[in-house]
């Protein structure tokens, strides 16, 4: 292979040095014409579900059939998630930077004729500001993007995740080459520790300290040591790790290899949930490409360091996101937690020192090694450094992936980046941290999104899901939902979790049915304390959080369910009735046609009436009515 003084072919395989990597990168860059049109089509899971495969097929077919000058014939590229999921499929046109939303295959002809050939925007496909309705042409001008600080997500949506050459062109594997050539393993660990990086999987444990703990365990008892990627993202509303694995798999792989070099590991595992088939596919391709280029496997970059990894697919058990349950699953046993009196860095996989970090944590490592701990720690807050990727979902205009510096206030994420809630009113609450997190009310909207501030508010960072709620969301129902989810996902190994969660859920069921008692609130809090103190793993110890925070911040709503037997949000079926406002009803009969119980009567073009005795409160009439005539009482 090249010694760095001669050019190498862009199709060369084995790279033996940093110089080889740099030469390959330059060759790739030289062959790319930045002025030539390029069509980037989002192929994240969400956009695929909305038809992006048909969109890219249409681009390829129409471009092939059209008489387009070779100089303006666009390159067509499928990318990872471009972030603004509620507006997909998304299409980005370079070099103009035009951003199109909700693109259909039928729109492709117009895009080619107007944008590619005539350099004109297709006005109807432009993003429109949810508050002003003003169309915005470029991604850089859209507040959703301009107010973010994209570090981890910087390349996702811009590169082809199935191409190692695309990744190398934007600096992929530079950090690995730097570490292997200029840094000792100890210096890599020190750099990570000095960066202040904390685990992005939920607990926020300092990554450098975890790595140092593993090294001490190896010194004490010997190896081997293992490195593991936790890709078993299971929180409702969370898809950050999925998007990173799908859209930039080499970032995760490079981080894992760097961790292996720092810790002296020769074997690693990527534990990915089975529900993420595209992530698995892209990671498998990335590993195959990295091996072919000498970046994974034996004697990486001719450095003498060897490391390889394999993918293990989880079967969808939420509890396997917990470290020890994940390890037992990899070992081929039922994924149940182990007692925590011995830390995983001392006795993890097969009783050996093991470092487990989640996908986003590993993706941070190359950035830290490439740009330095000082650069990384300058972002965020002193105790929560760097950026954090959040999934902004629920009652918010701009649903999707958001990356901001740690410490960014909730209101900036929801109201400015997210564009607020559709009704234009203030949001009611934000659930952070998934099913084990907590509900933060609007009055705490200035709470910084960092580990310590969220803990002080009674919530937690978790993996990064942010579920936005409005006045039509019932906190009792939210508590029931999360308790039911965790009850079903609990492994049942310990009594506090197995029995306690069921009892808490039953109490909330009574509240929603108007059968609750005041003393039940105290019982809930007592049960929660017992579960937190006695559960074997973090699933149980954090499970009461949604219930406790909603009682803390929305006690009046609980009392309304108990004392008044009313659901202020109009959600709990046993406590509500539906009626039709005769002044607003136009008699269009849409609700009557769809009512499963045929309990809506009235002549066409005359006000209708709901028979309350027959109504099952399914809500179809409320969803169907275009005139806001259906009322919830």
Image (tube, rainbow, N blue to C red):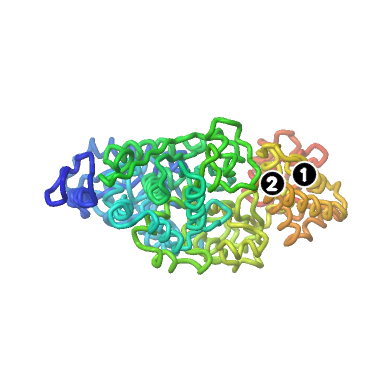
Q: Where is residue 485 shown, x and y percent of the image?
A: 67, 42
Identify which residue, 588 or 63, lies in the foreground. Answer: 63
Q: Where is residue 142 shown, x and y percent of the image?
A: 42, 61
Task: Label 2, secondary structure: give it.
Answer: helix
Identify which residue, 382 or 140, lies in the foreground. Answer: 382
Task: Label 1, secondary structure: give it.
Answer: helix
Badge 2: how crowded within 10 Å, few (<14), some, or many (20+)? many
In the image, residue 400 above or below residue 405: above
Q: What is the number of the mark on residue 500?
A: 1
- Give left or right: position of 83 versus 27: right
Q: Are marks 1 and 2 in contact (CB under 8 Å)?
A: yes
In the image, residue 516 above or below residue 430: above
**Corner quadrant of residue 307:** top left
Q: What is the number of the mark on residue 209?
A: none
Badge 1: how crowded within 10 Å, few (<14), some, or many (20+)? many
State the residue at coordinates (74%, 34%).
Answer: 597
- Give left or right: position of 361 versus 537: left
Query: Disc 2 designates what residue?
Result: 540
In the image, residue 92 above or below residue 411: above
Quarter placement of the N terminus: top left
- Give left or right: position of 578 versus 272: right
Q: Residue furthest front?
A: 220
Q: Where is residue 86 shown, x and y percent of the image?
A: 49, 49
> Which mark sits nearer the N-terminus, 1 or 2?
1
Kindly tell me whether residue 605 is visible in this rendering. no
Q: Where is residue 121 shown, x and y percent of the image?
A: 32, 54
State the residue at coordinates (74%, 60%).
Answer: 554
Kindly tell me whether residue 235 is visible in this rendering. yes
Identify which residue, 468 or 480, lies in the foreground. Answer: 480
Q: CA distance from mark 1 to mark 2?
A: 9 Å
């Amino acid at each position: 292979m090249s010694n760095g003084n001669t050019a190498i072919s862009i199709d060369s395989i084995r790279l033996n040095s940093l110089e080889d990597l740099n030469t390959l990168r330059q060759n790739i860059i030289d062959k790319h014409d930045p002025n030539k049109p390029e069509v980037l089509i989002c192929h994240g899971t969400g956009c695929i579900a909305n038809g992006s495969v048909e969109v890219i097929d249409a681009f390829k077919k129409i471009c092939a059939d059209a008489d387009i000058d070779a100089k303006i014939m666009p390159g067509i590229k499928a990318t990872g998630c471009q972030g603004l999921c509620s507006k997909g499929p998304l299409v980005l046109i370079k070099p103009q930077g035009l951003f199109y939303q909700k693109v259909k295959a039928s729109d492709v002809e117009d895009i080619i004729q107007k944008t590619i050939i005539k350099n004109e925007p297709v006005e109807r496909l432009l993003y429109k500001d949810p508050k002003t309705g003003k169309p915005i042409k470029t991604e850089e001008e859209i507040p959703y993007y301009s107010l973010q600080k994209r570090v981890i997500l910087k390349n996702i949506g811009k590169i082809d995740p199935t191409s190692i050459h695309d990744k190398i062109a934007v600096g992929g594997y530079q950090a690995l080459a730097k570490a292997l050539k200029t840094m000792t393993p100890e210096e890599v660990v020190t750099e990570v520790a000095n960066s202040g990086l904390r685990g992005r999987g939920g607990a926020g444990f300092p990554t450098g300290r975890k790595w140092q703990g593993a090294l001490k365990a190896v010194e004490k008892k010997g190896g081997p040591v293992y490195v593991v990627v936790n890709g078993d993202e299971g929180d409702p509303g969370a898809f950050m790790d999925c998007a990173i694995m799908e859209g930039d798999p080499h970032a995760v792989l490079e981080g894992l290899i760097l961790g292996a070099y720092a810790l002296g590991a020769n074997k690693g595992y990527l534990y990915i949930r089975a529900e993420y088939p595209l992530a698995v596919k892209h990671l498998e391709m990335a590993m195959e490409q990295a091996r072919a280029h000498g970046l994974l496997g034996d004697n990486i970059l001719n450095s003498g360091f060897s490391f390889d990894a394999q993918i293990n697919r989880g079967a969808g058990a939420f509890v396997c996101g917990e470290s020890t349950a994940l390890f037992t699953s990899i070992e081929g046993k039922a994924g149940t937690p182990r007692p925590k009196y011995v830390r995983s860095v001392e006795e993890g996989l097969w009783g050996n020192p093991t470092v487990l970090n989640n996908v986003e944590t590993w993706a941070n490592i190359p950035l830290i090694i490439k740009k330095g701990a000082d650069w990384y720690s300058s972002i965020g807050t002193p105790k929560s450094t760097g950026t954090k990727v959040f999934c902004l979902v629920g009652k918010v205009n701009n649903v999707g992936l958001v990356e901001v510096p740690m410490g960014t206030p909730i209101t900036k994420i929801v109201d400015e980046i997210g564009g607020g809630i559709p009704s234009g009113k203030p949001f009611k609450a934000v659930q952070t941290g998934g099913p084990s997190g907590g509900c933060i009310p609007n009055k705490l909207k200035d709470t910084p999104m960092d580990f310590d501030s969220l803990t002080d508010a009674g919530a937690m960072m978790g993996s990064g899901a942010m579920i936005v709620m409005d006045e039509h969301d019932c906190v009792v129902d939210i508590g029931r939902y999360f308790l039911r989810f965790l009850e079903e996902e609990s492994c049942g190994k310990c009594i506090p979790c197995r029995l306690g969660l069921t009892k808490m859920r039953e109490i909330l069921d009574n509240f929603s049915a108007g059968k609750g008692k005041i003393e039940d609130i105290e019982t809930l809090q007592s049960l929660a304390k017992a579960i937190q103190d006695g559960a074997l793993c973090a699933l149980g110890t954090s499970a009461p959080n949604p219930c406790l925070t909603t009682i803390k911040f929305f006690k009046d709503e609980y009392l309304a369910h108990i004392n008044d037997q009313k659901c202020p949000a109009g959600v709990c079926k046993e406590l509500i009735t539906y009626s039709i406002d005769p002044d607003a009803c136009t008699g269009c009969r849409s609700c009557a046609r769809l009512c499963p119980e045929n309990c809506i009567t009235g002549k066409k073009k005359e006000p209708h009436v709901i028979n309350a005795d027959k109504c099952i409160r399914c809500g179809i009439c409320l969803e169907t009515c275009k005139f806001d005539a259906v009322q919830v009482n």
